Amino acid sequence: MAEPLTQSDIFYITLTCYYWGSSSPRFTHEHTSEAVKALAQLYIDYPNITDDQVASYYGWDIKTYDVMAMNFAPFNETAFAAELLPLAPHPRSTGSVLPLFIVFTILSTVVMSLRLWSRWSLLGRIQNFDWVALISYFLIVAWGAYGVHASLVGGDMASWCDRSYFQIKQQSIAYNVGMTAYPMVVLSIKLALLIFYYQLSTWNALRTAVLVTGFISIGNALGGFFAFLFQCHKVNFWDSEFDLTLKCEVHTLKAILGTGIVNIITDALVWVIPMPLVWRLQLYPRERIIAFFTFGFGGIACVAAAIRLEAVQNSIRFGIDGKDSILPIIAWGIIELNLALICSSAPALRALLMKHIPKLLSYGSSGASDIKSMFKRTGGNSSGSAGTKIRSAAGKTHIHVHSDPQSPVSPQSPYGKNMSTASIRIGYVEYEKRDSTGTDVELPIQHPPKAAKIEGFV
């Protein structure tokens, strides 16, 4: 009974299959193992065949011959690898990511449609960061579709010995294109959120955090993009396996891990940035928890990004050990990108629910009497005096605050002159139209010292 092969044996057999199968036009569309079997048969039929005659049989040019001689001479010893082929693992591919792609594309399409409907129904317009998010949606769908192509083009078998060189090459191209484009797709989602946060408030601390995070995210995305694009001095390096002048000086695994870790850190920052703003709002505990949950929902995408990065670390040499390992990378990429888009749309979806189911998710009761008491609790005059007036329009209750420089600050107000008001409708930024008499608001906000007024909040 033959002893089981070691990982080193499997590695050697797989590389032998790859190089001999890819070296000859004769075997381009046949399993690479057939090229190794043909070599063994040559030495059986012609025991005294020379290396030059072997080169002639396989149709090698001088560059290919030099590479093969450097790695596999004497060729008659390499022929013994054919005897190990039956002992090597021959796993089937773990399947297509097509079902996963379909499910998440449907989810993202529904969420994106509701997000745009929310903006249009509540504001009557689509805002600039929503257009960026829409671009992200199309990029995510395109990246996922190409990932499906990458998962299918390699065939049904996992090991390189059970694939043709054509299948291996096409999957390699698809994999590298996907890995190159991935940082830019992630960046588009972050930019949509960061643009929104920047327009959320004139608070300098928040805007500084947005700009710093954006700068790091853009630099990291460009670094990952160019590191993979120019990992070799020829972009189409897959056409130059047998070119000894080919130089690949970028350690792709280190580049992926480095940019991936920074990507996860900036992911976390993007979801944390609005938290201080939420904390400064004068909210009931339940309302504050809902607000934190709405913004912190994106932490799920950070977890998916970490799992994807681990899959990349474990699978960077896909197919080299006789196992299929490109699919986990693609699968977790699809999950991460779609979750990030879905989570970033949570505030807009909440706004839509607040409109149609206000008692379920609103920051307070939609009734005028409850808003009166809330305004009184935060220092306003709820008696309907010249200072405030409550009215309803289009199914929404508003508090009209009159600006009266002659009126002293109410002794009920614990915040004094630092109290200001702004539109707080979770899901979009709305710039209030101000006149000489007052401002329509839905919730009072206390401004931090020296902080600019918050124009809107999502």
Image: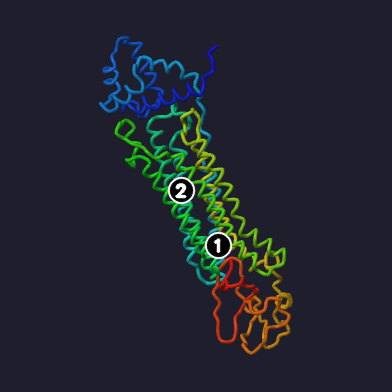
Q: Position of residue 415 (x, y in %)?
A: 68, 76
Which residue is at the far top?
47
| Residue in the foreground of this view, choosing between 377 and 242 | 377
Residue drawn at 33 percent across, 24 percent down: 68
What type is the residue that disc 1 sits on?
Arg
Q: Report x, y in % for residue 389.
A: 67, 84
> Regarding mark 1 in the picture, which secondary structure is present there?
helix
Outermost residue to the front: 450
User: The N terminus appears in which quarter of the rendering?
Assistant: top right
Above or below 289: residue 373? below
Q: Is residue 134 left or right of residue 76?
A: right
State yes or no: discs 1 and 2 in contact (Cβ < 8 Å). Answer: no
Give the residue drawn at x 40%, y 29%: 164
Number of residue marks: 2
Judging by the rendered image, the residue that carries numbered circle 2 is 182
Q: Is residue 304 left or right of residue 317?
A: right
- On screen, 160 above or below 56? below
> Between residues 423 and 413, which one lies in front from this camera angle?
413
Looking at the rendered structure, the kind of residue marked 2 is Tyr
- The mark found on residue 115 in the picture is 1
Q: Quadrant of the C terminus?
A: bottom right
Mark 2 nearby-residue class (10 Å; few <14, some 14–19, many ≥20): some
Residue at 48% over, 19% down: 86
